[in-house]
Image (cartoon, rainbow, N blue to C red):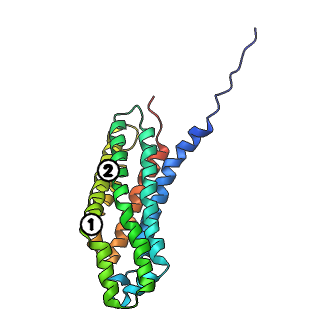
Amino acid sequence: MTTQVHAPAPVAPQASVRGWAAPAALAVAGVLFLVYPALRPAGDAVPATTAAAFAGWTWPIAHLAGVGGFVLVTAGLLGMRDRLAGTPGRQLAGWALGVWGAGAALVLPYYGAEAFSLHALGATVTDTATLLALTEAVRMGPIQMTVFGAGLVLLAVGAIVAALAAARSGMLPRWSGAVFALGFALYLPQFWFPMELRITHGALVAVGCIVLAAALRRARPLR
């Protein structure tokens, strides 16, 4: 009688990639959300140094770090939705992804204006009064403020729903999305914080993203 030994089925490369892609996206997003306020010049708040702040290379790079963070969180939430398939948190994770994606779509044009328009103005406009007037027009118009504000509210809602999805999933620790939700709930008010507190807030968001990333990486499907 011949005994057949069956080798374990190989793990599909796609499944392996999916296993680390979403956590990696969230972790890198967290780093970028800290880089953004840490690298961003604070001199734009003082008229005498506004032009120098806008014209420096760190201005667009800092804002592009923020852009990258929002995009990577979207990718991370997509992976989270897929990871929670078959759990009580799956539907909420889908809602979180949709709401977050809508919020990011509304926020990113404003970041583009900050990164590129203000950078160009700082490098070319020599009169301080003219520069301040143009900056006000770029930042504070009713359309852009409405779109940006609505986007930030949607991001906060999406992050809170993602935290609820994690809590109800039965796969992730119940608390794993709490700091993530808190960080993005504070994203709108933090724009009125002094720069030191904005950097602290960036660190809070980074911790939230990395904690959620670690929870996703360690998650195992329900049997």
Residue occupied by mark 1: 145
Picture coordinates of residue 119 (x, y %)?
A: 43, 78
User: Label 1 sits on what residue type?
Assistant: Met
Q: Is residue 174 visible?
A: no
Q: Is residue 181 left or right of residue 120?
A: left
Give whichever of 99, 130 is nearer the camera: 130
Picture coordinates of residue 108 (x, y %)?
A: 39, 61
Give whichever of 127, 163 is nearer the camera: 127
Secondary structure, mark 2, is helix
Task: Give the residue at the far right of this rendering.
Answer: 2
Residue occupied by mark 2: 158
Q: Relative to 194, does residue 128 appear above or below in the rendering?
A: below
The quarter of the image holding the C terminus is: top left
Residue lying at 44% horizontally and 85% vertically, measured from the top left: 124
Residue lying at 40% horizontally and 31% vertically, measured from the top left: 86
Q: What is the C-alpha distance between the residues marked 1 and 2?
A: 20 Å
Sequence order check, earlier mark of 1 and 2: 1
Q: Is residue 18 visible?
A: yes
Secondary structure, mark 1, is helix
Q: Is residue 213 left or right of residue 150?
A: right
